[in-house]
């Protein structure tokens, strides 16, 4: 599904190039549950952003479902987000002005899903994550764990093939973290969703089936 | 403390450069515009204050009430009425009769021949025959001569500095010298006065004694005994003994001449009387007018003032809006400061320092802009460049008030809101939730601001359409290719007219030549009572009178409705009247031809033709009943219809004929369409003014919208990022950001349209000839505003939508 070839990424400050990623080559197949690990500042988020097409590598090739990502324009990228990719963020990034229900609805509107189907899909997910009672609340009226549940629900609602999660449990207590991880595992096993998560915890990584260790911008095999 | 605040304030402003620039520019433009309008108002309101007795000076008007056309007031009085006033009003300390004149002054050459020097009065000046009371009423600055005796005798004349210096080089040389007025009247210079200031309705060229007018009565067609003839040339001014006597003098005035003024019209409720008007109201009475260059109605001044205020208000709303919008971005900073122990007052001080700094900048830029643009004012108003500007102390007061008000309004609100945040809330809240209550206020301000802008734009569109309509209206005569010039002729001069006409007609390009007292459209009014068909009672209205020769109709292209123009004659033998005369008398044009007619108390002659209505006065006025008749002794103007081609050659040829006919006079010509354009100059200037205001309204409105859109885009960067990774397209995001603003603009349009309709309807009702407001005027103004708003906002929104979301989504 994903093929990275000699991905390189540096940040230029003045005349100084700071390499964050170098010679990163990896292959991720459909249905895998991969955890990216490594010390802080190793470039995990940068790698995930590249996979999520939020950043472009300064060199190297990236193939997504057999297509060269470097050829994608703004519109094609938006299409990818609508059709294939769901994001889960450490800081949840819900839209503050919208209720839980409306937050879940937003991606479906962009996908042009008809309103009846939107309703039933949202109802399903609310039910599945046990947050039906919260549907009319605003994000700042929820606890962190609840917000992240909404965040994951929102990532799932468009039925993506790939979920990218950057330290999804970084701000949560261990009990909530376990709940989130088991949801990921269940999704991966039962629905075949490919998941790539960044995590610091060995425990969380244990839910997945592969670990990519990032050190000094390279993948330790 | 203050220094520290200032340093932080400057840092803040340099950091938010776009915001600071928008804010300063918007407010500065508003301030500059309101300063310029203030300048106009100040100028117009300063009129006639140069006379130290101005509160006690009055003039007498003739007012007729009860006519179906509404009340009619003239600044002219019948001469015998003046005598009656002098005898009956005890409250006047001094009074003077005035007779307007537009003389040429020449210095004769000893032993005859062409004069040594000649100077003609300019269009913007006036000369009077005045009684000695004039110098008691109006305190002029005397440079030479004795004011007590300067206007006593026949031939006494007082020159202004300009005339004296032109004729004699120095003011001191002028006294007791001989000059000739109107090529006929020898005068002795008895005094020299300073030129009058421009903000005065007495732009005097020369003053001659009233005794001179009496002595040369036949030359000036001056008749002391006619009650029925009212000419705007003959006026009456007086000085009250005490300004509190105005009402006493007014009620006494109502009784004067009642019998004589009303004896001919016992019918209906038509009633003529003399009324008193204080000098302070003269400049603002557009109907009656003055001897000055222009008048301006109170309603026009109110419109100007309101526009100035609205523009300033818009700019202030804008400023407050941007200031509050930005301050919400600093909720976090406030939280940190509070957690560090800063108290509420010092936070307020910090915000106020920032606001006052930016307001001070705007004021400075605004004054600079106004100063640079001040010379442009002469294109849209009567304000001369010489009008003091920065030296006007009231201007600085005005600026100080604006400065303090804007600082308080735009600084106080956000600083109160922000400093009132609990630190925990401010720290915890991310940017979006910090907007708090500010959002509703901000929306109200945006809507108000756009309502004002929209109303101003609609107003401008309607005004410009109305003024264009007036300018392009069928005047009823042909104003193209008619060259006009004036002359002063005594009885000898008048004998040369026939030869002059013959010589002019021999020029290849000259088609028609006509002598007359007035052009078809002129500001002069001469009205008279009349009778038709030997009715036992005279009709209850006056007729305007124009004196002209047999070629007037062809020269100016007037259209005949019935009968024919009168045949050549030096004195009246036949009359022509206009369509309105027929209508008012209730007779058909065909019916009226052949009836006998009499002007004033003169002899009966037949009406031979009816001419289609043409505009004889301002287009603000309705058509008046008009009588046209030949009377050679009154002719002072020449109209020459020429054929196209070689206009300058023809003009030169005409000049040489003129110079040979009147060697002692100055040839000054003007094409009739130019003088018509001058006649409507105030309209055309006001139209330009409206265009400027509309542009300004759009500009300020857009600066504000641009700032708010920038701010909204910044405030919502995170949201935009999130929406993008949820699959929103660029169009989705731009729409999201633009939609909110367009909704506000639409709301503003909804409010502004009926308001503008109401006020413009009132404004239009002042015009006799007016347009109907059409839906397209509103549609044009609205779609213009929406389009401009859309482009302004979507520029910023598009930028936000195209930005890479990754930066806003990072968590570090
Ligand atoms: N926009 C940027 N400009 C400069 N340096 C950056 C930028 N973004 C990230 N970095 C640097 O890249 C390195 C890797 O960042 P990141 O991928 O966020 O690490 P991780 O997620 O593994 O902690 C860090 O040293 C960070 O400072
Ligand atoms: Mg990271």
Image: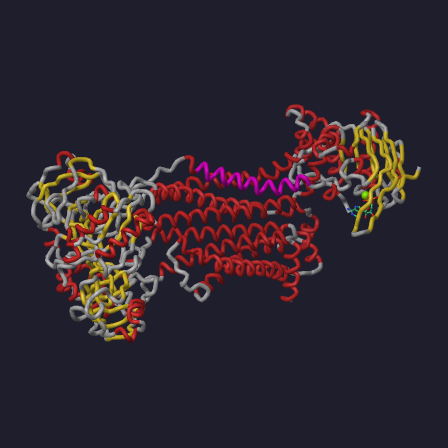
Q: Residue at x 83, y 32 (%)?
A: A182
- Between residues B530 and B33, which one lies in front from this camera angle? B530
Give the image location of residue B147, x and y in percent: 23, 73
Q: Tag count in the figure? A: 0
In this rendering, the answer to whether B428 lies above or below A136 is: below
- Between residues A210 and B570, which one lies in front from this camera angle? B570
Per the picture, the main secondary structure of the magenta-coloured stretch is: helix
Q: Residue at x 30, y 62 (%)?
A: B203
Give the image location of residue A151, x and y in percent: 74, 36
User: Is residue B255 in sight in this rendering?
Assistant: no
- Between residues B781 and B115, which one lies in front from this camera angle? B115
How is the rendered protein coloured? secondary structure
As for residue A155 lying within the magenta part, the answer is: no
B351 sits to left or right of A185: left
B179 sits to left or right of A48: left
Give the image location of residue B90, x and y in percent: 16, 66
B454 sits to left or right of A112: left
User: Is residue A171 in sight in this rendering?
Assistant: yes
Give the image location of residue A22, x and y in percent: 87, 42
As for residue B779 lying within the magenta part, the answer is: yes
Q: Quadrant of residue B259?
A: bottom left
B216 sits to left or right of A77: left
Please identify the quadrant where the C terminus of chain A is shown: top right
**Which portion, as a residue range, is magenta?**
B778-802
In this rendering, the answer to whether B591 lies above or below B166 is: above
Q: Quadrant of residue B741?
A: top right
Q: Quadrant of residue A155?
A: top right
Please identify the quadrant where the N terminus of chain A is shown: top right
- Between residues A141 and B623, which one lies in front from this camera angle? B623
In this rendering, the answer to whether B563 lies above or below B127 is: above
């Amino acid at each position: 599904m994903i093929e990275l070839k000699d991905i390189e990424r540096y940040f230029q400050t003045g005349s100084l190039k700071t390499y964050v990623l170098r010679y990163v080559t990896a292959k991720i197949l459909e249905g895998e549950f991969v955890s990216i690990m490594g010390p802080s500042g190793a470039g995990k988020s940068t790698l995930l952003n590249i996979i999520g097409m939020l950043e472009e590598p300064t060199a190297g090739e990236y193939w997504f479902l057999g297509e060269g990502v470097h050829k994608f324009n703004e519109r094609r990228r938006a299409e990818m987000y609508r059709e294939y990719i769901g994001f889960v963020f450490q800081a949840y990034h819900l839209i503050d002005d919208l209720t839980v229900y409306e937050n879940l609805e937003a991606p479906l509107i962009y996908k042009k899903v008809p309103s009846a189907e939107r309703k039933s899909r949202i109802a399903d997910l609310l039910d599945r994550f046990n947050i039906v009672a919260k549907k009319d609340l605003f994000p700042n009226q929820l606890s962190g764990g609840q917000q992240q549940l909404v965040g994951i629900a929102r990532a799932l609602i468009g039925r993506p093939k790939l979920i990218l999660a950057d330290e999804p449990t970084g701000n949560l207590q261990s009990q909530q973290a376990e709940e989130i991880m088991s949801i990921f595992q269940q999704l991966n096993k039962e629905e075949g969703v490919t998941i790539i998560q960044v995590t610091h915890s060995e425990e969380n990584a244990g839910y997945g089936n592969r670990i990519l260790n990032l050190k000094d911008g390279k993948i330790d095999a | 403390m203050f220094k520290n605040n200032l340093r932080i304030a400057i840092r803040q402003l340099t950091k938010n450069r776009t915001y600071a620039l928008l804010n300063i520019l918007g407010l500065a433009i508003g301030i500059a515009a309101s300063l310029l309008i203030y300048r106009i108002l100040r100028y117009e309101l300063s009129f006639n204050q140069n006379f130290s007795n101005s509160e006690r000076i009055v003039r007498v008007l003739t007012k007729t009430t009860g006519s179906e056309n509404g009340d009619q007031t003239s600044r002219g009085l019948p001469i015998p009425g003046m005598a009656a006033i002098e005898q009956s009003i005890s409250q006047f300390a001094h009074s003077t009769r005035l007779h307007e004149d537009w003389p040429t002054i020449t210095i004769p050459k000893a032993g005859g021949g062409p004069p040594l020097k000649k100077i003609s009065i300019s269009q913007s000046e006036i000369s009077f025959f005045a009684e000695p009371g004039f110098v008691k009423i109006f305190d002029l600055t005397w440079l030479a001569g004795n004011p007590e005796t300067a206007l006593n005798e026949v031939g006494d004349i007082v020159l202004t500095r300009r005339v004296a210096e032109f004729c004699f080089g120095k003011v001191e040389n002028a006294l007791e010298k001989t000059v000739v007025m109107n090529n006929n009247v020898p005068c002795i210079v008895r005094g020299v006065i300073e030129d009058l200031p421009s903000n005065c309705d007495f732009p005097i060229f020369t003053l001659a004694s009233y005794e001179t007018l009496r002595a040369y009565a036949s030359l000036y067609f001056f008749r002391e005994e006619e009650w029925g003839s009212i000419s705007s040339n003959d006026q009456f001014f007086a000085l009250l003994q005490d300004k509190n006597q105005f009402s006493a003098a007014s009620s006494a005035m109502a009784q004067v001449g009642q019998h004589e003024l009303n004896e001919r019209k016992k019918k209906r409720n038509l009633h003529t009387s003399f009324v008193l008007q204080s000098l302070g109201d003269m400049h603002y009475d557009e109907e009656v007018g003055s001897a000055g260059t222009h008048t301006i109605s109170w309603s026009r001044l109110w419109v100007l003032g309101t526009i100035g205020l609205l523009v300033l208000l818009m700019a202030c709303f804008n400023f407050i809006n941007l200031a509050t919008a930005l301050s919400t971005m600093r909720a976090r900073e406030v939280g940190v400061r509070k957690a560090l122990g800063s108290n509420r007052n010092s936070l307020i001080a910090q915000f106020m320092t920032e606001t006052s700094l930016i307001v001070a900048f705007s004021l400075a830029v605004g004054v600079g802009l106004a100063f640079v643009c001040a010379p442009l004012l002469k294109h849209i108003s009567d304000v001369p460049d010489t009008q003091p500007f920065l030296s006007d102390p009231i201007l600085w007061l005005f600026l100080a008030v604006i400065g303090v008000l804007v600082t308080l309004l735009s600084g106080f609100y956000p600083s109160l809101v922000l400093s009132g945040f609990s630190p925990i809330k401010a720290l915890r809240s991310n940017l979006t939730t910090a907007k708090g209550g500010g959002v509703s206020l901000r929306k109200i301000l945006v809507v108000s601001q756009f309502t004002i802008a929209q109303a101003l734009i609609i107003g401008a569109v309607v005004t410009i359409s109305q003024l264009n309509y007036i300018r392009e209206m069928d005047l009823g005569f042909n104003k193209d290719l008619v060259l006009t010039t004036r002359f002063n002729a005594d009885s000898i001069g008048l004998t040369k007219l026939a030869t002059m006409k013959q010589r002019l007609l021999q020029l290849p390009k000259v088609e028609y030549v006509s002598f007359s007292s007035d052009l078809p459209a002129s500001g002069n009014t001469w009205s008279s009572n009349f009778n038709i068909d030997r009715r036992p009672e005279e009709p209850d209205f006056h007729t305007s009178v124009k004196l002209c020769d047999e070629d007037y109709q062809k020269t100016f292209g007037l259209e005949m409705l019935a009968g024919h123009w009168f045949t050549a004659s030096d004195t009246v033998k036949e009359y022509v009247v206009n369509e309105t005369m027929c209508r008012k008398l209730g007779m058909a044009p065909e019916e009226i031809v052949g009836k006998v007619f009499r002007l004033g108390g003169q002899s009966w002659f037949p009406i031979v033709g009816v001419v289609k209505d043409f505009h004889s006065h301002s287009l603000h006025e309705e058509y008046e009943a008009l009588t046209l008749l030949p009377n050679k002794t009154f002719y002072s103007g020449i109209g020459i219809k020429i054929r196209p081609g070689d206009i300058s050659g023809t003009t030169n040829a005409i000049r040489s004929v003129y110079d040979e006919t009147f060697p002692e006079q100055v040839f000054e010509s003007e094409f009739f369409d130019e003088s018509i354009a001058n006649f409507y100059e105030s309209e055309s200037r006001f139209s330009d003014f409206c265009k400027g205001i509309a542009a300004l309204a759009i500009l300020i409105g857009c600066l504000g919208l641009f700032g708010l859109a920038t701010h909204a885009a910044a405030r919502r960067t995170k949201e935009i990022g999130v929406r993008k990774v949820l699959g929103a397209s660029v169009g989705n995001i731009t729409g999201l950001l633009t939609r909110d603003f367009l909704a506000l603009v639409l709301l503003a349009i909804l409010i502004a349209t009926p308001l503008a309709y109401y006020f413009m309807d009132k404004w239009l009702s002042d015009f006799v000839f007016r347009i109907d407001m059409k839906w397209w005027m509103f549609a044009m103004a609205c779609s213009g505003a929406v389009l401009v708003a859309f482009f302004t906002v979507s520029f910023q929104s598009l930028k936000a939508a195209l930005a890479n979301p990754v930066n806003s989504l990072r968590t570090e």
